[in-house]
Amino acid sequence: MKPVKILYVDDEAMALKYFERLVGPLAPVLTASSVEEGKSMLAEHGAEVAVLVCDQRMPGEYGNELLRHAREYYPAVVRMLTTAYSELGDAIEAINTGEIYRYINKPWELESLRADLKNALELAELRSERDGLMRDKLMAQQGQLLASRLSALLMVGAAVHADGHEQAVHRFAQAALRMGQVEPSIDWHRWDHADLVQAEAQRGAAVAAHLRHWLREFGSQPDGAGALPVLAQALNGELQGDRVLVADAQALTALLSSPAGEAPTVAECAWLAWLLWQGGLAEVVVADSGWAVRQADAAALLPADWLADAIERLGRATA
């Protein structure tokens, strides 16, 4: 939803009516008569509000308290303070602390008021466009990171346990798709491309080491249902008949979903290691208290493009 509305907060009923009549032709106007009411309006309509204009002197909390609240919880909203000349110091302080874009003197001069609000609306539109571009970039980068991680798991799996590695990673990807919790966060204020590539390479090396650890722990490959108790212990899950209940989805998805730069833990590698160990003959299904792993039928012949398909579907899941 594109924000297009102006929220005006003032304890004087006549000022609210006058503002709405003057500004209504410029943009839809929402009004509130106190700081608390203004917070409630933001909670309900925050995604619609482009500009917040707040009077300073009101009973109870002053307007700059609402502006601080908006700065923290609704940073895309352009914030403005309207004050009498005698309250100019409050406006200057609000500007210096980053709480407002600018202030409007009372009493208002019609053309000046409309010009200031028009500029604020244009700034809000620019912020909205910028945020949209950043979201698009982030989703694209998340998709690329997911593709890189899944490809790396296939290569690491082949290196540490060649037998059945492709079926195992395929089942791993299918489980992640079913669970739908695989959006890795990336702090782009911290990471440039080269640093991210290095961090992910180090992550892959750590995953390989942890997989080897688990494969040594698991020992020789079991037959039939003997694999499920091993998985229950490794994941701290609950063995129930022919399946293992897993309450924490992160235990099954962390190798794809962990934030960039976060080192994988031994526990996060247990699920993939177990799949490698028993040839990928398992699947994840929905359970009453989370998720359940159950054994699957003998491995079917995988399509040649299964990895490309999984990468594409994971990319769509993050969009």
Image (cartoon, grey):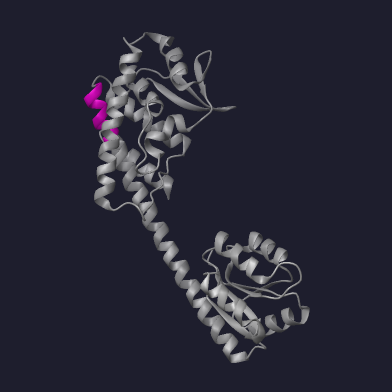
Q: Is residue 303 visible?
A: no
Q: Is residue 259 above or below residue 252?
A: below
Across and down, in percent, residue 259 comes to 40, 43
How far across and how far down the image is residue 118, in percent?
A: 53, 82
Q: Residue at x 37, y 46 (%)?
A: 315
| Residue 160 on the magenta span | yes
Q: Position of residue 305 (x, y in %)?
A: 27, 37
Residue 88, by quadrant, is bottom right
Q: Looking at the picture, does residue 290 appear above or below residue 139?
A: above
The x, y position of residue 208, in whole percent, is 27, 28
Q: Which residues are magenta?
A: 152-161
- The answer, for residue 72, to whether it is visible in the render is yes
Instruction: In this rendered view, identify the residue nearer to me: 59 or 181.
Output: 59
37 relative position to 217: left or right: right
Residue located at (53% from left, 76% from top): 121
* Magenta span main SS: helix
Horizontal arrangement in the rendering, residue 26 relative to residue 15 (left or right): left
Residue 145 found in image quarter: top left
